[in-house]
Image (tube, grey):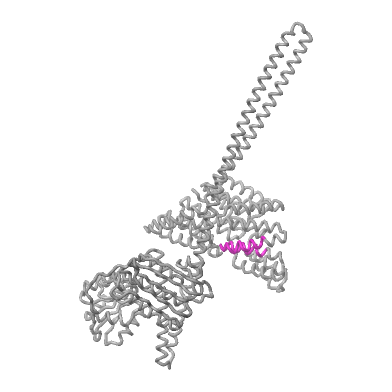
Amino acid sequence: MKQLLSRTAFVFLYLCLVGILAAQSTKIDSLQQLLKQNTKADTNQVKTLLKLSRTLFSVDIDSTLKYTIKAYELSRQLNYIHGEAKAQNILGACYYMKSDYAKAIKYFKKSLQTNEILGNKIGLSDTYNNIGAIYKIEGNYPKTLEYFQKSLTIDKEINDLSGIAGSYSNIGIVYDILEEHPNALQYYLNALQYYKKANNQIGISDTYHNIGNNYFSQNMLSKALEYFQKSLEIYQKLNNKSGITWSYYNIGKVYRVQNNYDLAQEYFKKSLALSVEAGNKSQEAKNYKELSLLYLDLNKPAKANRYANKAYAIARATGDIELLRSVMKILSTSYAGLNQYKKAYEYHVEYKNLNDSIFNKENFRKFTKLEYQYKYEKEKEAERLNQKKKEEILAKERMYQKTFRTILIVSLLVAILIIFFFIWLYRDKKKANDLLIQKNSEILKQQELISKQNVEIKKRSDELLEHKNHLEEIVQQRTAALVKAKEKAEESDRLKSAFLNNVSHEFRTPMNGIIGFSSFLTEPNLSPDIQEEYASLINQSCRQLLNVVNDTVEISKVQSRQTEITKSAVNVVDIINNTIDGFSDFAEQKSIKIKLHNAIDRVNAEIISDEYKFERIVWHLIDNALKFSYSGQITITLKTTEQNQLFFQVEDTGIGIPVSLQDVVFDPYRQVEIGNTKRFGGVGVGLSLTKAYVNMLGGEISLKSEKDKGTIVSLTLPIEKVEKRKEKTDKIHTGNINKKTILIAEDNDLNYLLLETILSKFDTTLLHAWNGKEAIEILSKEPAIDVILMDLKMPVMDGYEALAEIKRRHPGIPVVAQTAYTVRAELEDINKINFDGYVTKPIKISNLINVLKQVL
């Protein structure tokens, strides 16, 4: 179980602010007074600004940022490189605390370059440590260790006690993340030793905190709480608010694991309040995460979900991958607790994908284990061989000593008993020689055995090397896949950002016309012709705005696979002619002729298809052709193919599409031009919607284009013939609206005012209900009501509930629905639930009058 209390590597911050303890108010006031007195733009003012920034750092990040920016700009004006380097490092630390890691690493790398120019080893060490801390937040642990080791090397060279301690502490944090807790604890103890030598109270407090983290990771909760409280005491003495924030947070985690939920909640909320006050988004998100875990433990999934979503939003914004991964898991669990299993599954999939892609820690540990095992076996084998050689040499020495003694004794005996022992000496020498031969034979055998063992060792070494290379190849492949996925995500983000900018522009342009010309209509002395012109322009802007809304909603439905096919009899010739008529004014303004080559007679013009989607296909293709043409003509071809398919083609003489964009022009959010200098309107989803609709209708679409010469878009659709039926004559509605009492159920003032204005032309009595419940009450008091106009979406009681009750009590009174639905399937649903008719918003006067006449 991993329960690592990982602060966001806050140990590194002291490196920017060496020697700074609590931000005492008297010192701040003194520096601010000195700043007011010294108004001269010189290096002294830069030094004062930097001192004030360092003093304010643990109290007020925003003020620190303000003074540091002034110091940085003044240093650049004065070409004061030392001031630039210090300001860059403090700016990086400020943005780090505000969780803006992109800006933080930008200024740290600038500081690195400046300190290299100055040859400032202390500055280089500080900056290496800070960059390593950023990479830790992003989950790039190899890079993290690389930069921390660089910092440690420099600190040891210059004998910077606090610097050495900080590097040891940061390396320990990385080992804690990798769950190498004994190694991490050893680094923390080394750090504590150096901090005490330097009498660095901030460093001592930070290290107590890290040791508490380490014990918590090993589930040694009492020890963890002891060190967190030691750390908190020092932070409180120094009035270090960021340290107090972290201490409250981690003490809360200990109490949560001990099931002491009241105390845990108290400490989390203390930490959260300080995080929000300091603008520390990273710590704020972690408190939200812990509160969500606490409420999950208390079986309160709704509260847990609310806090987890807050943490999720901040983690997304700051790019904190570790936090994002853990919050996704919490969201999946909380949604499951709320019985929202679809969302629970979606977040579970996101969590699994992110967990797999961060980095395979198990492979890393296996690789490290193999590497260490290889080194160990190699050293062990070398030691064994050395020991064996020593034993052989010792055996030889003993043998030679024994032989020498024997010879000496024999010589003495021979000298004394030369005659008596001559034969015995001869035999003894022969025996010694035989023994020597035997020993030599044994030595040769041992040498042969050693040679075989060397071959086996080399074979194992080669296998280990091959396995290592295989692991490196896997890592490279996964890295390449991650880079590719990152590039794809960045491209998607870029296109979506461009889409949002385009949507904003396309919304604002017609809204500008609507608001502007509406304000002109209120001016007195306007002639009727001018009023009519302004009204026409407002109507045109409204339709333009409606098209943008429809496209935006439809692309969302298509991407979420919520769009359905609703087939009916469709007259393709009428749709094409009506669409061409709708663009006639626009074409005339641009001096463009639209020609239709129709090879289908009226008998075969009707097919079974989705009327709305076919109409949008035609509309988008003609709209694109007009939009990207300055003059010339647009040729539209309609015919049937030999394969009994409907062939539709739009050819223009416009700017054409570059070859580089032709493969992606049907992708969502793609446009020929993207940026502030675009000359053409639209939100970039027209061709994407067109292709989606063509595919849904079982057809195919293709494009040919040449830059500056024009574009041809062709499509084919399957033809499903309409069964022959008797011709119907249009029903003439002769119902009389005059002298009728009409009840309007509408909760929107503007919509009611519009209906009141339309019906004021007739001699009618109008009654107004704000919701369905009020409509039923009015109906019970006024039984002479002739017809009811019912909005579907209202507070208290909506139109559906009200309809059921009205039909039960007064089945003879017609009820007409007002709806914003435009899809045929949705409108058919309205008919199925016993509404006598419907009108769609925005309401056309003619449609409203016809429906009322029909039901009266």
Q: Residue 367 appears at what percent x and percent y?
A: 56, 45
Q: Nearer the viewer, residue 398 or 288?
A: 398
From this view, report whether residue 771 is shown above or below residue 473.
below
- For image coordinates 63% across by 26% down, the residue present is 446
From this view, report whether residue 614 is shown above or below residue 754.
above
- For image coordinates 63% across by 37% down, the residue present is 379
State which quadrant residue 743 falls in. bottom left
Q: Nearer the viewer, residue 740 or 652?
A: 652
Furthest toward the right, the residue is 415
Give the residues drawn in magenta, as a range. Answer: 86-112
Q: Residue 777 appears at what percent x and percent y?
A: 26, 76
Camera sees residue 450: yes
Q: Residue 61 appears at what percent x and percent y?
A: 59, 65
- On the picture, is 150 further left or further right than 695? right
- On the picture, is 12 further left or further right than 753? right
The answer to if 89 sits in the magenta stretch is: yes
